[in-house]
Amino acid sequence: MQDEPAIPAQRYRTLFQQAPVSIQILALDGRTLAVNKAWENLFQFHDDHPVKQMFLSGELNVLTDPQLVASGVTAWLRRALDGESVEIPPIRFDVSRFDGAAQARWVKALAHPVKDEHGKVVEVMLMHDDITEQVEAQAELAQRLDREKRNSALLAKVAQASRTLNTALSSQQIAEALVEEVRAILEVHHAGVSLSEGAHLRQAVKAVSRAADAAEPPLMRARLAVPLVDRKGHNIGLIEAWDKHQGEFTEEDEAILVQLASIASNGFENAGLYGSLQEQDRRKDAFLATLAQELRTPLAPIALAMDVLKTTGAGDLRVLKASEDIGRQVRHLGSLVDDLLDVSRVMRGQIQLERTRVELETIVAGAVAQVRPLMEARGHALVVEQEAGNTAVIGDARRLVQVLVSLLDNAARYTPPGGRIVLSVTLKAPAVRIAVRDDGAGIEPRLLPHVFDLFSRGEHAPERIRGGLGIGLALVQNIVVLHGGTVAAHSQGPGKGSTFTVSLATVPV
């Protein structure tokens, strides 16, 4: 036989106590009439807990509780007591003030008025939803996003610092830039770096950065130091940061300083090597200048001796031929010495231009006259195509003739005997283009970008005239650039000839 159905009151109490949601029944004056098991679990006040009894006795009233009043919950509850069903926004309800063992909870609630058959409010049912885990998860996510955003900003600053440090060419410049970056990124009042003397560091380098509002002398509240280590693991110096704007240094600060130290160490090494290369380059330039001067010294007496030999041995064909050979080699050696002197002046920025108005016809005629003997000796056909009329430029006539002579000489050297070389001048306002075109050895694609590099020479071909140091085209480029012009090389490849084009600005006739 089944049990008799429970009476309504018992059923109500059972449903109330076993409801999965926290329920608190309020009287019209704000007293707590009843709470269920879920409420006890939510606020951690079970059975005969004193705080629970304080609620049920009316000692704690929801309409006068300071925490509920301050958070605005009381105002929502009054609307429910007036007959309106309301959703109360989430609040952090700190129950630890009642019991130190209890923990604060985040809750949102629904306050629903309970009415009699006449529609009069007799009590309010307050249902709570524990959202503590959700709020804490959102807070943790927000903190994580904030950390990631801060880390991204720091990485961007470190990347910018890396670009800044990599543009500096000297150790002192790197040190001065480094301390500024460290102070800005780590937010400190002071940063300093010191380098020891080493293989590539000719003198100790030091730099310090201090904020305008920093204390003097500096406050030594906290200090962070990281060694500077080169690629071989040798200690080359130290980078320090101290007097942080706020708080103490963190592991994150140390990691950033280590990263900056690594970037700076590479920069210091590169700067040292760059400085060493500059010194070697300077010595090379000085050597070339000295060599050219030393080679020029014996040329004059050799030339004089050749003239004497030629005069005294005029009746001896062997002596005459020997003197002519000596003269040819002296002239060739003189040309090489002149090139060496010119390139040394270019590398040291000592070329001076005598700028005047120059007719291109005069420049072309002067260059052709100088190279005519070489062209005839090689059996080349030299064709001049003058299509620019009475075009003039502003420049150094001697140097412009030197440019064309070098280009024509280069064409003759790399063109087999009997070849065709064309010197053309065309006007394409506001510039004039001078092109030297040959049907000779051509230029390999891999060498084309380097034809104007100093000491760059093409592969030796059997038919190529020996001689040349690979500095003629480098001089051509430098002289043309000094005139504000451009020079370019073009070739379809080996055996298909080459074209060198000079472009210069013209002046009104």
Image (tube, rainbow, N blue to C red):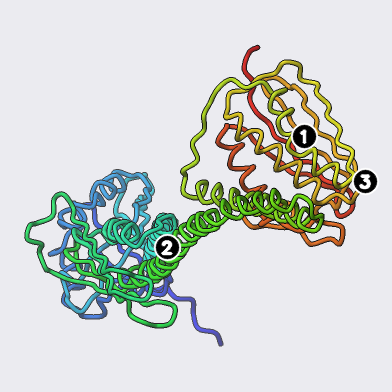
Structural crowding at the residue carrying mark 1, measured as other residues with C-alpha within 10 Å and reported as few (<14), some (14–19) or many (≥20): many
Q: Which of 119 and 401 is in front in this view?
A: 401
Q: Name the residue under label 3.
A: 418
Q: Nearer the viewer, residue 211 or 284?
A: 284
Residue 46, given in percent of the width and then of the height, sits at 26, 79
Residue under the image location 13 percent in, 50 percent down: 213
Asked whether, in this view, residue 240 is left or right of residue 376, the answer is left
Distance of mark 3 from mark 1, alpha carbons?
Answer: 20 Å
Residue 98, given in percent of the width and then of the height, sits at 16, 71
Q: Which of 310 and 101 is in front in this view?
A: 310
Task: Tell me the amino acid under the disc marked 1.
Answer: Ala
Task: Tell me the amino acid under the disc marked 3.
Answer: Gly
- Which quarter shows the N terminus? bottom right
Asked whether, in this view, residue 404 is left or right of residue 24, the answer is right
Distance of mark 2 from mark 3, alpha carbons?
Answer: 46 Å
Residue under the image location 82 percent in, 51 percent down: 414
